[in-house]
Image: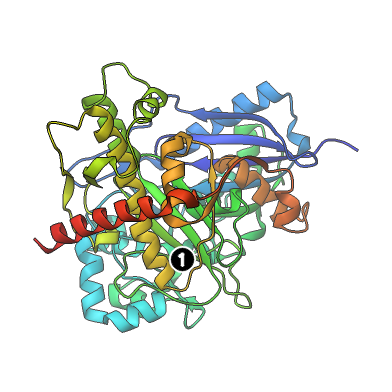
Amino acid sequence: MANRYLLGFDVGSSSVKASLVNADTGKCAATAFYPESEAPIIAVKAGWAEQDPQMWWDNAKLSLKKIMAESGVTADEIAAIGISYQMHGLVCVDKDYKALRPSIIWCDSRAVPYGERAFVDLGAERCLGHLLNSPGNFTAAKLAWVRENEPHIYERIHKIMLPGDYLALRLSGQANTTVSGLSEGMFWDFREGRVADFLMDYYGFDSSLISDIVPTFSIQSRVSAAAAAETGLKEGTPITYRAGDQPNNALSLNVFNPGEIASTAGTSGVVYGVLGDVNYDPKSRVNTFAHVNHTAEQTRLGVLLCINGTGILNAWVRRTVAPEGISYADMNDLTVSVPIGSEGITVIPFGNGAERVLENREIGCSVSGINFNKHGKAHIVRAAQEGIVFSFCYGMEVMQQMGMDIRKIHAGRANMFLSPLFRDTLAGVSGATIELYDTDGSVGAAKGAGIGAGIYKDNNEAFATLDKLQVIEPDEAHRNEYLEAYARWKETLEKQIKQ
């Protein structure tokens, strides 16, 4: 039998990554990303963040060209295509499917007042009961900003879409979206099981702006003749999966069922858990979206905790506190002599803007408890990592209040999860077992495509070859020490919040 390959794209804000996965062995045959330095983000004003959708398409083509050359795979051997993408962005296209303006991406904050006003005007009960969130700074609020501030653009909009919808459009010439995608934009009414008409009416949006809805796992569209000529792909190749980066990261780690948790810890950190019934946080400290396998018959919701001040704090400590030229591994070695709790030093890690888990407060990063006679660089290095872990645990308590039983955390072995100190502290405080895997978003998107194309009967078959690299069990012997350090951290945080 001829080899079958699955193609996955991951449209990030720093690059577009592409991977080819052998459908039969589950192994990655080639992977590449462009640009190799970070992609530009346009910031015309403070708090704004935009990217040109054409740039995503160009980088997707460059990544694809490289993996096809490296792997020797032919276009005929690609059985299906999957797409992962940066969440919450807004792309506006005209009747010719041309982008009308740069995309307003996830980290752009200009729409905050539009979401807050809708929450007040429509009422917390209605928004939370139907959207499971405040309209916040999500895609719908971004579109409201365009309508009010750029009416000449707004009146020409034929369809609105998320970044992944746009890449699928360029591949197929068809505009469509998913329930999961609509939910992350605040366009989905979970109580009614349809587009949120009440929010559309409030903002004055016409229902025709929403693209056709297709299942997350399905033949959503096919590569067009024009895209085949431009990319070298085969005309008719099906696009069979699409999801935002955090639901897709969970899929990549085979997290599909209630109680299962996926985590990442890069510049910012995410804990993403699956709920089996409709619920939300009344204070919107965590966000609830439709998970990749959510259907009308089976409730599967993704609860998303995002902490802005994670890896960025560790990087700051490396640049400004740790000895010059030290590596991250050396930083961890430096802390071996420092006991759990850093002998009384507490670091509050929220120095990267407002934190949703703190109800959008911006309290900054702080270091307290320093004794000049006994504390050195190693103590601050350890306390910073402990503070990052404690912020995760603080948010996970909100998830537990929503009914999530956190016993196992799945993560890729990357970024902060490369740190034994970080991993051991997270397991020690949470009491959860941590399992580390070898995967990434574009590989996950490729395997999602395999599910959507029917090549795999379910997620367990798709991820049967997922490599488990390491298991970290909670250190019960030192549990009380971890919990005491966390209690002190939380007391310090709550004092700062009240100030």
Instruction: Identify which residue is drawn at 13% across, 31% down.
Output: 373
In the displayed structure, does residue 342 sit left or right of residue 298? Answer: left
Residue that lies at the very extreme toward the right in this rendered image:
1
Where in the figure is residue 81, as x and y percent of width and height? 65, 45
Answer few, some or many: residues within 10 Å of disc 1's Cα (few below 14, many 20 plus, some between 14 and 19).
Answer: many
Residue that lies at the very extreme toward the top in this rendered image:
325
Locate the N terminus and report the quarter of the image it occupies.
top right
Q: Is residue 303 above or below residue 422?
A: below
Q: Is residue 223 visible?
A: no
Which kind of residue does numbered mark 1 sit on? Phe
In the displayed structure, does residue 360 sit left or right of residue 179? Answer: left
Q: Quadrant of residue 114?
A: bottom left
Q: Is residue 17 above or below residue 411?
A: above
Where in the figure is residue 287, as x and y percent of width and height? 39, 64
- Near-viewer residue (97 or 38): 38
Where in the figure is residue 281, as x and y percent of width and height? 36, 72
Where in the figure is residue 248, as x and y percent of width and height? 55, 51
Q: Secondary structure at mark 1?
A: strand
Residue on which the image places disc 1: 289
Locate the C terminus and report the quarter of the image it occupies.
bottom left
Instruction: Identify which residue is drawn at 67% across, 27% down.
Output: 68
Q: Quadrant of residue 158?
A: bottom left
In the displayed structure, does residue 420 sit left or right of residue 168? Answer: left
Q: Is residue 269 above or below residue 30?
A: below
Q: Is residue 275 visible?
A: yes
In the displayed structure, does residue 200 sit left or right of residue 458? Answer: left
Instruction: Identify which residue is drawn at 78% across, 51% down.
Output: 455
Q: Quadrant of residue 130?
A: bottom left
